[in-house]
Image: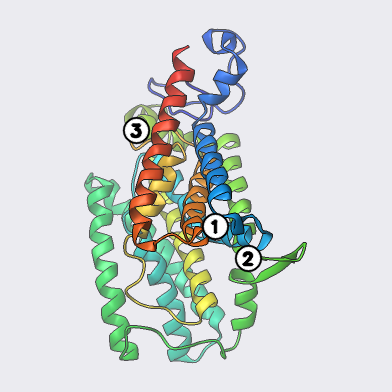
Amino acid sequence: MSTAGQTGPTATVPPAPGPPAADGPSARRPLVLRLLARPEVGVFLGAAAVFVFFLIAAPSLRSGGSMATVLYQSSTIGLMALPVALLMIGGEFDLSAGVAVVSSALTASMLSYQLTVNVWAGVVVALVLSLAIGAFNGWMMVRTGLPSFLVTLGTFLILQGVNLAVTKLVTDNVATDDISDMDGFGQARRVFASSFDLGGVQVKITVVWWLVFAALATWVLLRTRYGNWVFAVGGDQESARAVGVPVTFTKITLFMTVGFGAWFVGMHELFSFNTVQSGEGVGQELIYIAASVIGGCLLTGGQGSAIGPVFGAFMFGMVNQGIVYAGWNPDWFKAFLGVMLLGATLVNLWVRRTATRR
């Protein structure tokens, strides 16, 4: 089943946002089946199942404070899963997303400390660098025609080496210096890493930013011309180009969106812990991609949503913290996580196939 605004074009005309046509097989299909065929509904059911499972297995998880911890864990994944999902809908991957987060944090920290300037100067320079890394990935892929897998794998290795080598060269250590006493730190921390009271529970500001960015991404995908372009270039790049879609612009800006996400998460990590370890971030890119895939984004591009990855990230956060609150051996975390995610993906796939077959 194809829903307007959710699936890219396969012919010569890009999709247009708005409600589906009132006639045809889709209109005759029951409402429940039409809902199940949407990319985000399957992962919602999977996330709900994981949620109920851990509420039963870990009673301590039922408190407000524990749920706030789960939401915080989910938000740190979801903030990056959102731009990664948009890029995947556009038909591309970014394997450098995990280490790019660390690159951004290292840049802001070392520049501010070594030059003894207000931390906002480092924040701005880190933003420029992150957007530049995204633009380079997009430009290199478009200019050479190489798969984004290879281009961003190269960027991943470059950034990983630069992060470690430059940090050791500048600080004579693998971590940056503490910047908590520098000018502007308190203001930046309130933006990127503060908490607020909600009914007696401390909620991290990243949860708010996560939901705001998800709403913004949904609006862009479903209500703007740029959203149509994203689905179009992910569905059939050549057909999209033939009808006037600016493929190069769309691809490069999608990579730059990932760069923006890396900058934001990097700033959160920096102002949460005051210092940054240069070797972190490796492997996180797979978590972001997995959350997007579980959220209904196709590996081949052209289909997905911004809401689905929100539930995908929540599932990761729930499993991560649920194992801790259940008191299980953390050595089994990765294995358990893999089984849960594979099961959720299969349930998602089964629900959608069932819904579209009838």
Up-down: is 21 above or below 333?
Answer: above
The residue sitting at 46% across, 17% down in the picture is 356
Of label 2 and label 1, which has the lower sequence position?
1
Mark 2 vs mark 3: in front: 2
User: Tag 2's secondary structure?
Assistant: strand
The residue sitting at 52% across, 28% down in the picture is 38
User: Tag 1's secondary structure?
Assistant: helix
Q: Residue 237 bears which disc, if any?
A: 3
The residue sitting at 28% across, 55% down in the picture is 152
Amino acid carrying mark 1 in the image:
Ser
Of label 2 and label 3, which has the lower sequence position?
2
Amino acid carrying mark 3 in the image:
Gln
Q: What residue does disc 2 label?
A: 204
Q: Are marks 1 and 3 in contact (CB under 8 Å)?
A: no
The residue sitting at 54% across, 76% down in the picture is 271
Q: What residue does disc 1 label?
A: 75
Task: From the top left corner, tell me how far across and down residue 114 is, in percent.
Answer: 43, 90
The residue nearer to you, when weighing 63 against 95, is 63
Question: Is 152 on the left-hand or right-hand side of 16?
Answer: left
Q: What coloring was used for the rendering?
A: rainbow
The part of the image, by quadrant, that contains residue 66 is: bottom right
